[in-house]
Image (cartoon, rainbow, N blue to C red):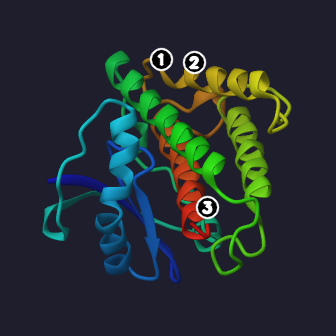
Amino acid sequence: MLAIGEEIAPKKVFVWAVEWPGWCRSGRTVEAARENLVAVRPRYSAVAQVAGLRLPLVTIDQLEIVESLKGGAGTEFGVPSAIGADDRRSVTAREARRLAGLVQAAWTIFDRVASEAPAELRKGPRGGGRDTAKVIGHVLEADSAYAREIGIKNKPPLPDDVDAVAALRASILGILSNRSDGSPLADRRWTLRYAARRIAWHAVDHAWEVEDRSDS
């Protein structure tokens, strides 16, 4: 069985694997989102592999819903933004290191895909007219904003500033790899579990976008 959470809005639904940050897909209906989640298992397995983990085999019938949340404007816009009781569970030191490892692996996959992608990407619904450099910049800007949600103040690093990018990611991982009682981080809104799944989802989603819109 694979434990999943769902975020349901009238026009868009997100479904994610609870213990696997970044393994998250959307659809117009609950059924479509679940099907999309199972369909991308082979792609997400690369993230698990980088983290030194083995992804379980799963079918639609093996999905176990542990929480169903009401979505809102963020959901409709295309962002898994609801935080539920499952996200507020405590996190042991061992669990935290595992979650942080998967976030780091998501960044590794994104960097790998972006470095191999053409400068110009095919136009279409996945990202509109944004080319590879713009996608990279967008992910870094988002990570900088995410860092502030967990108590890290910084300026978005330039894509070619390797040291600054590494420092930003290290500061995020430093927070995510510590045990937590499930309370919001930095007295804000995001919990550790939600931060891990949101950050990893964003990196993985854009890695797959770049792959889908590459010529090769």
Q: CA distance from mark 2 to mark 3?
A: 28 Å
- Image quarter hosting the C terminus: bottom right
Task: Give left or right: position of 58 versus 155.
Answer: left
Q: Nearer the viewer, residue 39 or 153?
A: 39
Would you say 122 lies left or right of 2 here? right
View extreme (front): residue: 216
Location of residue 48 (image quadrant)? top left
Q: Is residue 180 above or below residue 14?
A: above
Q: Residues within 10 Å of mark 2 (few under 14, many from 20)?
A: few
Q: Secondary structure at mark 1?
A: loop
The residue labelled by disc 3 is: 210
Residue 122: horizontal and vertical position, in percent?
68, 75
**Residue holding disc 2:** 174
Picture residue at 58% right of the left edge, 69% below the top: 72
Q: Amino acid at mark 3?
A: Val
Residue 78 visible here: yes
What amino acid type is highlighted by mark number 1? Asn
Quarter of the figure with residue 24 = bottom left
**Residue contact at pointers 3 and 1, CB within 8 angstroms:** no
Nearer-the-camera pick, 143 or 113: 113
